[in-house]
Every structure is written in structure tokens, then in C-alpha cells.
Image (tube, helix red, strand yellow):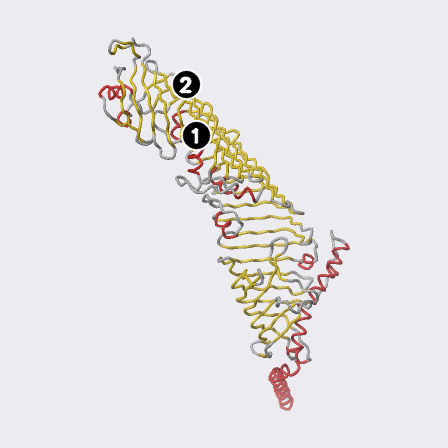
């Protein structure tokens, strides 16, 4: 190759390098003279649809990328000059096109908002959203897409969607505020993320993190046709929400117009439903400890109604299946449906869905019935196996109903203690206070097993019998319900035995006189032909109208009162041997009976003999 040709090539490359260097060196000068602050503000306004004001002078950087750095930037509504800005940012970084800048134009693809404050308003649906722009490329594109959707809602012509560019908006260390009584109240803090939307007719994604009510949250959303979605048409949508108290996801299609419609798969999970209710400030504060809850369902939602089909849920690791229907009425929402469980913890269910459950085992706690003022509920339940504390049930059929201040949980049929159980729990909120009604009918049950579950292990008939309990009265706590209740208790048992009762030892102690504890004669069992108990409850005190047990040789009876509040006993009783001749005492005929007094408490009763007339031999 001739040396002159080589020299010309070297000079050409050198000249090009010099030109490039001069252009790069001139960019800040060109930008500072031609891409002035007002030009950038105008372009941002045309892009966003808001009135953009830039207080500080733009600073241009060339390396590592050509960008403009703006300070004290505000985006406000054009129609209300006195309203506070919709967005305020301490700093905005805009990536610019170098070639466009050399031609005097502003073209950018990415904007970064540093420490922005976004003002939102609460919508009729309860969501907090920023004010929509009244103009700009975004609004015009949405209007054009709305025309296509209105022309053919089922299948709009996607090829005619506007193809204006949008780009990427990043935000760092921002916050979201809403005006409450004239003051800005922070809704979200530490807000960071980005929205990516290359062109109006392309897909868009949003990813954001922040702190809401003291918890870190992450939100991700994506749609292949976001413009159709914003225009009120139907489009695919995926949405996920993650936080320590709960996670939520939706994958399906959506319509976000006034006649909103959703169709897809929904998943929700919470390690503690109680924590979710407290964190969300739903106004429902159940008194019982509520465990984990999760649900996965096919959802169809439209016009104030949500249908959950093929629903799989788990409450405290108790899985169930069924269908639910949610209607959003003008007063309270209405939840109805049918759920079937393999196993079910009734205490957890009551706590989670009706707020009727007690605080926890052994803790009285407040009874919270405010749930009945916020929702109407009508659920049909079934469970192959269920637990109510230590009580085991099988083949359970139940209903849970909440309406207009009345909360009811009924078990219409269940197998337990070798027999059948029916029970009802009702809370009726009235101006004078909450009225409570408890009903229980246990038919053909094993008395020993029933007594053990009820906490009674002394003098309990071991045999088949029927127990009926009816209690009514006011109550704010679980203890006060039983302390103030009125009602009745009745029980009848067939052949069996009295557990933990040594009758010969008992009679021997009465013959000897003096006080003795019932525990001293609990090392035996007395066979009986039957037993019957009838008691009247008045303000938490049981008065025994009849309490008799008949054995082949003896009849044992009790009468008196037993207090729930103090657990005290004040009973009199006797042991009669009716088939023996009457004894003589002071020359007069008298029954062959040993009489005694029972005092102390339920857990530590003691016996005081009154008269001695029956031999234990």
C-alpha cells in the first residue's frame, strides 16, 4: 500500500476523533444555551400532562451518560393553580439524547425522581390514587384507546393503538401523602421502584417497594396491554403484593372501568389473620388468637359481587374446599357459601370468621361482637372431624350466621362422646348490652367422657345418658356470661356407675363423724341403676331441684346451690337404704338414712355428717 494512502487514512481518523472530541466537549455548552430550563419543562409537561416547574438551573453531565439534572421540580394540575403540586421532587435526573440535543431538541427515555412526594386522593373504592392528568401524550393516548374500546369492547383493534414513546420512570426514597383535614398525612414512606413502558402500544411493568403502616411492602404489576386497561377495556393483568403480615397475588384479566370486572386466579396467605386485621386497620379486633390463613380460588368479580369457585383454604393448617359469594351492598358486605373440611378447629373458625370465640383456653377475655355490625355472613359448614378445645367431634354439620348485630353459630348435628351433639351459640347486640344464649343437647352420650370434657370428674354417672343445657343473659366477658346467666340444666342416665366414689368408706366416715374431704373416699366406684339431675340457673348460681342416683341397695340425693363465680358449694344430701327396716331412735320411727352437708369448692369439696342411720356393710 502506498505510504501517501496510509498517511491520508491516519489524518482522516485523527480528524474524526478531533471532531468527536469537540462535539462531546461542546455538549454542555450547547445544552446550557439551547436546552434551557423552560424547554425541558415544556417537554416534561407535554409528556406528563401536568404543569412542570423547575426552580433550579439544569446541570448537564456528559459522562458516563448524557443527562440533565434538575432540582426542585413540581408537577401540578393545569386547572387549579392554588392546589398543592401532585408531585414534588428534590431532584430529577433525565437521560437525554445527545444527537437530539445538538439539533436543539429534548428527547429522553428515562426520568429518575429522587426523594419525590406524591399526593394522592382516596377514591370511592377506598384506594389511594394520584390525580389523573387532563392532557399530555399519556392522556391523549388513553382517549384514543378508549375510542377503540368503545367501538368494539369485546375485541378492539389493537393495531390502531397509539405508539407514542413513554420510557422508564424511576423513583427513589419517596413518599406518598394524602390530605386529611387540611394536613398532609403520610401513607407510604421509603418508596422506591420503577415503571417501564417503552411505547403506549407495548407491555408495561411496575415494581415498587415501600413502608406501609410500619411494614415493608413490595408491589409488582404487569400487563401486555396497559393502554387498553387504562381505557376501560379488558386486558390481561398480573399483580402481586408481599409483606410480612400477608401476601396476595392475582393472575387473570381485568377491566378497570366504572363497571370493573376481574376474572382469574387469586391467592392470599397470612401467618396470623389477627395481625392482618390489626395491620390493615379494618376496624375488626377479634378477641381470640387467630392463626394462619390461606386461600386459593378462581375469582369472578363484577358490579359489587365477587364469586369464589373451586376455593381451597386452610385455617390453622386445617384444609377445606368449597365456594363463596361476596356481595358488596350499600350497608354491609354479605358473605355466603359452603365449606367442607377434613379436620376443623372450631375455636379457630369462630375467631376468624365470626369473632365469637373465646380469647384462648383458660383465658376469659372480652367477647367482641363488633363483627356483626360490619358484615353479614351465612356459611354452611361440614367436617369429617372437628375439635372444640379438648372435645373431639365427627361428622359435623354446622352454620355460621351474622346479620344486623346478631351472631349465631349452630352445630345441627355431630357425633361425640359416643352419642349425638347439637349446640347453638348466639350473641345479640342490643342498646342495653350484648345478650347471650347458649344451648346444648347431648343425646345418648357416655356420661364419663362428657363429664371429663366438662371438667367434672367426681360423682359423674358413667353410662349412657342425655344432657340438656340452656343459658341466657347479658355478658361482656366470657366469665360474666356464666356469672349472670339464667337457665336450666337437666340430665338423665341409665344403668352405669358413679365414678370416684367409695360408698362404704363414705358411710363409715359419716358414722365416725367430723369433717372429711371427698377425696378421702374417691378410691371406688358405685354401680347404679340410673341417675337424674335437674337444676335451675339464676345469675350464675345453680339451684339443684333434683339430683338422685339409685343403686341396687341405696338411693343418694343432693339439694342446694353451687356458685359459678366463687366456685362455692352449699349442698345437703343423704344416703337412703329403702329396703331395710326403719331404725328406732328415741322410741320413734325414722327413715334409714345418713344425712350430710357438702361445702367447700368445686375442686375441694368437704363433707360434714348431720345424722347417721345407714350402715355401709
Which residue corresponds to mark 1?
538
Q: Position of residue 338 (x, y in %)?
A: 58, 37
The answer to which image quadrant residue 99 occupies is: bottom right
Q: Which mark is residue 596?
A: none
How far apart marks 2 and 1 lie (CA) works out to 28 Å
Residue 3 placement: quadrant: bottom right
Whether residue 382 is situated above or below residue 45 in the rendered picture: above
Q: Give the residue at the far right of this rendering.
A: 151
Place residue 403 in its image quadrant: top right
- Extreme residue in the left direction: 512
First in sequence: mark 2 vs mark 1: 2
Is the residue marked by circle 2 packed among few (<14), some (14-19), or many (20+) residues within 10 Å? many
Vertical position of residue 259 compared to residue 7: above or below = above
Name the residue at 77% across, 55% down: 151
Placement of 526 over or under 257, stated as above or below: above
Q: Residue 550 in the image: x percent, y percent?
A: 36, 16
Other residues around mark 1 within 10 Å, as few (<14) / some (14–19) / many (≥20): some
The answer to which of 554 and 451 lies nearer the viewer is: 554
For disc 2, the marked residue is 494
Q: Quadrant of the C terminus?
A: top left
Amino acid at each position: 500500500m502506498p505510504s501517501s494512502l496510509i498517511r491520508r487514512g491516519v489524518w482522516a481518523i485523527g480528524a474524526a476523533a478531533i471532531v468527536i472530541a469537540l462535539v462531546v466537549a461542546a455538549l454542555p455548552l450547547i445544552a446550557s444555551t439551547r436546552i434551557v430550563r423552560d424547554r425541558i419543562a415544556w417537554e416534561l409537561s407535554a409528556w406528563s400532562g401536568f404543569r412542570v416547574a423547575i426552580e433550579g438551573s439544569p446541570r448537564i453531565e456528559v459522562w458516563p451518560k448524557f443527562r440533565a439534572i434538575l432540582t426542585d421540580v413540581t408537577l401540578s394540575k393545569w386547572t387549579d393553580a392554588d392546589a398543592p403540586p401532585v408531585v414534588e421532587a428534590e431532584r430529577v435526573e433525565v437521560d437525554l439524547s445527545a444527537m437530539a440535543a445538538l439539533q436543539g431538541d429534548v428527547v429522553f427515555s428515562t426520568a429518575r425522581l429522587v426523594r419525590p412526594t406524591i399526593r394522592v386522593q382516596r377514591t370511592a373504592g377506598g384506594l389511594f390514587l394520584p390525580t389523573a392528568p387532563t392532557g399530555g401524550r399519556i392522556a391523549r393516548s388513553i382517549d384514543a384507546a378508549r375510542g377503540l374500546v368503545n367501538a368494539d369492547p369485546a375485541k378492539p383493534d389493537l393495531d390502531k393503538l397509539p405508539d407514542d414513546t413513554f420510557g422508564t420512570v424511576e423513583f427513589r426514597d419517596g413518599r406518598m401523602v394524602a390530605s386529611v383535614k387540611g394536613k398532609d398525612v403520610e401513607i407510604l414512606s421509603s418508596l422506591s421502584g420503577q415503571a417501564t413502558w417503552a411505547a403506549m402500544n407495548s407491555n408495561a411493568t411496575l415494581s415498587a417497594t415501600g413502608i406501609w403502616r410500619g411494614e415493608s411492602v413490595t408491589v409488582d404489576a404487569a400487563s401486555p396491554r396497559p393502554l387498553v386497561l387504562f381505557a376501560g377495556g379488558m386486558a390481561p393483568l398480573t399483580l402481586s403484593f408481599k409483606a410480612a403480615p400477608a401476601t396476595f397475588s392475582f393472575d387473570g384479566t381485568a377491566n378497570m372501568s366504572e363497571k370493573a370486572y376481574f376474572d382469574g386466579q387469586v391467592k392470599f396467605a397470612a401467618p396470623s389473620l389477627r395481625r392482618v386485621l390489626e395491620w390493615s386497620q379494618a376496624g375488626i379486633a377479634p378477641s381470640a388468637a387467630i392463626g394462619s390463613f390461606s386461600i386459593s380460588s378462581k375469582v369472578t368479580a363484577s358490579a359489587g359481587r365477587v364469586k369464589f369457585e373451586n376455593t381451597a383454604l386452610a385455617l390453622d393448617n386445617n384444609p377445606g374446599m368449597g365456594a363463596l359469594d361476596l356481595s358488596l351492598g350499600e350497608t354491609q358486605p354479605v358473605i355466603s357459601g359452603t365449606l367442607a373440611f377434613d379436620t376443623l378447629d372450631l375455636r379457630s373458625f369462630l375467631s376468624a370468621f365470626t369473632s365469637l370465640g373465646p380469647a384462648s383456653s383458660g383465658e376469659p377475655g372480652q367477647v367482641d361482637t363488633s363483627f356483626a355490625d360490619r358484615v353479614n355472613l351465612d356459611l354452611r359448614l361440614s367436617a369429617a372431624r372437628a375439635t372444640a378445645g379438648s372435645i373431639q367431634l365427627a361428622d359435623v354439620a354446622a352454620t355460621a350466621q351474622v346479620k344486623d348485630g346478631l351472631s349465631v353459630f349452630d352445630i345441627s348435628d355431630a357425633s361425640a362422646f359416643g352419642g349425638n351433639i347439637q349446640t347453638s351459640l348466639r350473641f345479640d347486640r342490643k342498646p342495653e348490652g350484648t345478650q347471650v344464649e347458649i344451648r346444648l343437647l347431648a343425646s345418648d352420650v357416655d356420661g364419663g367422657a362428657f363429664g371429663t370434657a366438662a371438667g367434672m370428674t367426681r360423682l359423674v354417672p358413667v353410662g349412657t345418658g342425655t344432657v340438656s343445657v340452656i343459658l341466657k343473659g347479658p355478658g361482656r366477658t366470657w366469665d360474666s356470661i356464666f356469672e349472670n346467666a339464667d337457665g336450666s340444666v337437666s340430665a338423665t342416665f341409665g344403668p352405669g356407675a358413679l365414678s370416684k366414689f367409695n360408698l362404704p368408706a363414705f358411710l363409715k366416715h359419716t358414722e365416725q363423724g367430723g369433717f372429711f374431704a371427698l377425696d378421702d373416699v374417691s378410691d371406688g366406684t358405685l354401680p347404679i341403676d340410673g341417675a337424674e339431675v335437674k337444676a335451675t340457673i339464676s345469675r350464675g348460681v345453680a339451684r339443684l331441684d333434683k339430683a338422685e342416683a339409685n343403686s341396687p341397695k341405696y338411693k343418694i340425693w343432693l339439694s342446694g346451690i353451687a356458685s359459678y363465680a366463687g366456685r362455692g358449694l352449699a349442698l345437703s344430701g343423704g344416703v337412703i337404704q329403702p329396703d331395710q327396716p326403719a331404725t328406732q331412735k328415741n322410741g320413734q320411727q325414722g327413715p334409714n338414712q345418713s344425712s350430710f352437708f357438702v361445702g367447700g369448692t368445686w375442686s375441694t369439696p368437704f363433707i360434714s355428717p348431720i345424722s347417721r342411720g345407714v350402715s355401709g356393710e
